[in-house]
Amino acid sequence: LGEIDLDNSFIFTPITDEEIYTQYPSLNYWDVRKTIHVIDEGNIYKSEHAVIKILDKIKVLKKLSPVLSTKLGLKMTKVAYEALNQYRLRQKENCSGCKL
């Protein structure tokens, strides 16, 4: 993600940084490990909503955001995100140093 964020729109915070949970008490470490989260202007977005927020911030991909925000686009984004996230979680299960 950092490589396509040419405008440096994102600040990446490690999920091990305890301060993020103090700043945003609704965040839960285990939920954050399992699902992508984006914080934008104090609002927390997760799963497919976080993906759409990311696409909206990257100029190269910004044109996709209005399409993905429709009911059909949101459904497609959700299905794609869930498939990719399940793949990521399966990969973690096979990694002895990365257990959730």
Image (tube, rainbow, N blue to C red):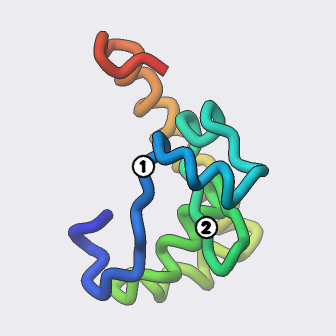
Query: Where is 3 relative to 98, above or below?
Result: below
Q: Residue at x 65, y 49 (%)?
A: 21
What residue is shown with label 2? Answer: 39
Q: Identify which residue is drawn at 69% across, 63% down.
A: 44
Numbered label attached to residue 22? none
> Horizontal placement of 23 versus 84: left or right?
right
Q: Position of residue 39 (x, y in %)?
A: 61, 67
Question: Which numbered disc, 1 or 2, marks the residue that appears first in the sequence?
Answer: 1
Q: Which residue is drawn at the image coordinates 57% and 53% (left, top)?
A: 19
**Which image quadrant for residue 43?**
bottom right
Seen in the picture, residue 2 relative to 94 is either above or below; the reply is below
Q: Nearer the viewer, mark 1 or mark 2?
A: 1
Apparent side of residue 71 relative to residue 6 in the rendered image (left or right) = right
Residue 75 position in % (x across, y down): 69, 57
Q: Secondary structure at mark 1?
A: loop
* Helix, strand or loop status at disc 2: strand
Q: CA distance from mark 1 to mark 2?
A: 13 Å
Left or right of 23 on screen, residue 10: left
Q: Amino acid at mark 2?
A: Ile
Q: Who is closer to the viewer here, 78 or 24?
A: 24
Q: Residues within 10 Å of mark 1 (few under 14, many from 20)?
A: few
Question: What amino acid is found at the position of numbered circle 1 in the picture?
Answer: Pro
- Residue appearing at x 59%, y 42% in the figure: 32
**Please, is residue 99 above or below residue 89 in the view?**
above
Left or right relative to 41: residue 89: left
Residue 33 % position (x, y): 53, 36
Q: Quadrant of the N terminus?
A: bottom left
Residue under label 1, please give it.
14
